[in-house]
Image (cartoon, rainbow, N blue to C red):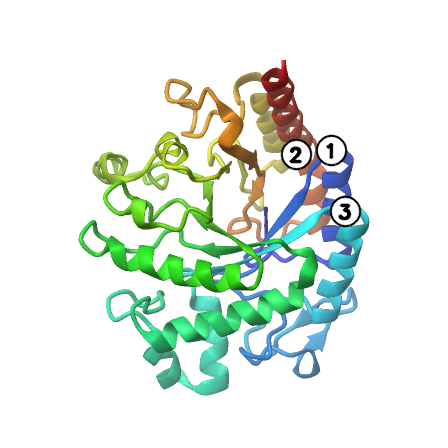
Amino acid sequence: MLDTARHFYSVNVIKNFIDNLAASGGSFLHLHFSDHENYALESDLLGQKVENATRRKDGVYINPQTGKPFLSYRQLQELIRYAQSKNIEVIPEVGSPNHMDGIFRLLAHKHGQGYVDSLKSTQVDDEININKPESIEFMKKLITEVADAFGSQSKHFHIGGDEFGYSEENNQEFIDYANKLASFLEQKGLTPRLWNDGLITKTVDGLNRNIQITYWSYDGDTENQVAAVRRRKIRASMPDLIDKGFTVLNYNSYYLYLVPKEGGNFSHEANFAGQDIEKRWNLGVWDGENVNNAVRNTDNILGAALAIWGEDAGRLSDKSIQEHSSGTLKAVIRKIRANDNQAGE
C-alpha cells in the first residue's frame, strides 16, 4: 500500500514499486491517493484537470489552486498497463467518511464552501454526512469516476472507513453506509475493501460479508490507554471477523507499516523492520506484537500488505523510499509464502 496522498510518487518510481512487487511474488498495489492533505488523482468531478495544471520538469502535474501534485488520467493508464504486464493489480482507495479534506478543498474551489458544507457531517468537520442521500450520491459519483479511470484490471476497490468518529449507539449508521457503497461497487463487478476501525461486535453481523477487511489495528494505535481499553472491548478482533465469515487481510500496523521521516534514517528503519518481520511476524499475527491472540488457522486470511505512509516523509525522495523499502517487502512476501507452504504440508 502506497500513500500517494501525503507523499507523492512519480510514475517512474511507482513503476519501480511494481517491479519490486513482481520480483518478490506480490499480487497487488493498493494506492491510497485520497486523504486530508491531498487528492492525488485527476478528477472531472472535483475540477482537478490537466489542462488547468502546471507541469514540472519531471512530468508531475501541480494543481495551481492547492499547490499539490496529482496523477493524470493518462499517467494512471500508463501505470495500469505496466502493472498488467507484470500481473499486478492496482487497487484504488477513496476513503470516507473521514480523511475527506483533500476532496472538500477541491470541491470548495469548484462549487464554493456552501456546497461543501451541505455534504459535511453536522458533528465532525472533516467527515462527510453518512446519513444524507446527497452526500451518499456524491460518493457514488466519485467512486464511479475512479472505478472508470482504473478500468477493468481492478477487481477490488477500497472505501476507507478508518479513524472516524462514532459511538456504539450510532455505529449502525456506518454499517448502513458501508453496505450502500459496497452494494454499489458489487453492481460494478468490484469487491469492496474496508479498514477495520468501525467494526464493533454489537453491529458487525449486519455488514455485507462480501466486504474484505484490511485489519490494521485493534485499538487504532491510540496513546490514550483509556480509549485503547474501550476500543478493544467493543471492536471486533480479527478472529471475530473470521469466525463470522469475513475475508480479512493483515495490515498489522506494528510490523507492516513503514513511516519514513525526513531527517531520519529510513534505510536503517526499513532494514530493521525487514529483520523483525523475518524473526517474529507471521501471517496470523494481527494485533501489534501480540502473539497470544494470533490466528492459528490462516486459511481465511487472504494475504497481507506492507503499507508505506507519507505523513512524515517531507522532502525525502520518492526514489530513496522505494529503494530502501524493497527488502522489507521481500521479507513480508517470503513470510507469507512460508506460511502457505506450512499450511500445505
**Residue 53 position by quadrant:** bottom right
> Which of the pair 271/127 is nearer the observer?
127
Picture coordinates of residue 139 (x, y %)?
Answer: 45, 70
**What whole-number distance in Å separates the C-alpha atoms at marks 1 and 2?**
8 Å
The residue under label 3 is which amino acid type? Asn
- Name the image quarter holding residue 288: top left
Contact, mark 1 vs mark 3 (Cβ under 8 Å): no
The single residue placed furthest to the top in the displayed view is 345
Who comes first in sequence, dot 3 or dot 2? 3
- Would you say the residues marked 1 and 2 are in contact, meaning their CB atoms lie under 8 Å apart? yes
Residue in the image at 65% along x and 48% along y: 29
Q: Is residue 266 above or below residue 183?
A: above
Question: Residue 8 falls in which quadrant of the image?
Answer: bottom right
Which SS class for mark 3? helix
Looking at the image, which residue sits at the far left? 169
Taking the image as drawn, is residue 68 in sight? no
Amino acid type shown at disc 1: Ser
- What is the crowding at mark 1: few (fewer than 14 residues within 10 Å), some, or many (at least 20)? some
The local secondary structure at tag 1 comes to: helix
Distance from the alpha carbon under mark 3 to that under mark 2: 13 Å
Residue 329: which numbered mark, if any? 2
Name the residue carrying label 1: 24
Mark 3 neighbour class, 10 Å CA radius: few under 14, some 14 to 19, many 20 or more? some
Residue 16's disc is 3
Q: Nearer the viewer, residue 269 or 296?
A: 296
The reply to whether residue 123 is visible in this rendering is yes
* Secondary element at tag 2: helix
Decide which of 273, 78 is in the foreground and name it: 78
